[in-house]
Image: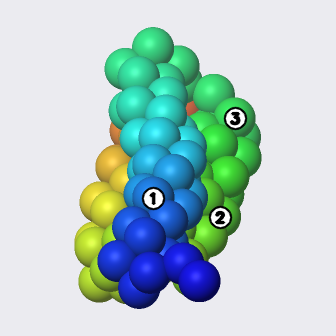
Amino acid sequence: MVSLTKRKQAKSEQRHRRNKKYKTKKNHFLKEIRASFEKTSDLLALKELFNKTQKVLDQAVAKGVIHKNNAARQKSKLSRRINQISSQITDDLSTKQSD
């Protein structure tokens, strides 16, 4: 019979692998969307990437990797940044049209 400590250790290693997978995926998408803020003005592509990032954050919450408030805070920050960019784009378009 397997001892309790060995079973606990095996479970701990399973959780570690699962958590690492979701954290890596989450960090990859966050890094990608933050980089795209700097180099792209394509709002549609940003929103699509934001939706994918939201999905990844929600998956991490569902698996218990991160706290739901942490994910909500990150989604809120990204959403505010996208709204900032969209308002800048619309302002630029309106000034060009008025000229």
Q: CA distance from mark 2 to mark 3?
A: 16 Å
Q: Going from the N terminus, do you reach mark 3 or mark 1 first?
A: 1
Q: Going from the N terminus, do you reach mark 1 or mark 2 first?
A: 1
Asked if labels 3 and 2 touch by Cβ distance under 8 angstroms, the answer is no
The residue type indicated by label 3 comes to Ala
Residue beneath disc 2: 55
Q: Is residue 16 left or right of residue 57?
A: left
- Element under disc 3: helix
> Would you identify the image quadrant in which residue 63 lies?
bottom right
Residue beneath disc 3: 45
Q: What residue lies at 40% left-to-right and 31% top-to-bottom?
A: 31
Q: Is residue 75 above or below residue 39?
A: below
> Would you identify the image quadrant in which residue 55 lies?
bottom right
Query: In which quadrant will I find the N terminus?
Result: bottom right
Residue 27 visible in the current orientation: yes
Mark 1: few/some/many CA within 10 Å (<14, 14-19, 20+): few
| Number of the label disc, if any, that sits on residue 13 | 1
Q: Nearer the viewer, mark 3 or mark 1?
A: 1
Q: Position of residue 58 (x, y in %)?
A: 57, 73
Q: What residue lies at 49% left-to-right and 34% top-to-bottom?
A: 28
Mark 3: few/some/many CA within 10 Å (<14, 14-19, 20+): few
Q: Position of residue 82 (x, y in %)?
A: 44, 49
The residue type indicated by label 2 comes to Lys
Q: Going from the N terminus, do you reach mark 2 or mark 3 first?
A: 3
Q: CA distance from mark 3 to mark 1?
A: 37 Å
Q: What residue lies at 63% left-to-right and 28% top-to-bottom?
A: 42
Q: In front here: 86 or 9?
A: 9
Q: What residue lies at 44% left-to-right and 81% top-to-bottom?
A: 3
Q: Position of residue 12 (x, y in %)?
A: 41, 68
Q: Is residue 77 left or right of residue 96?
A: left
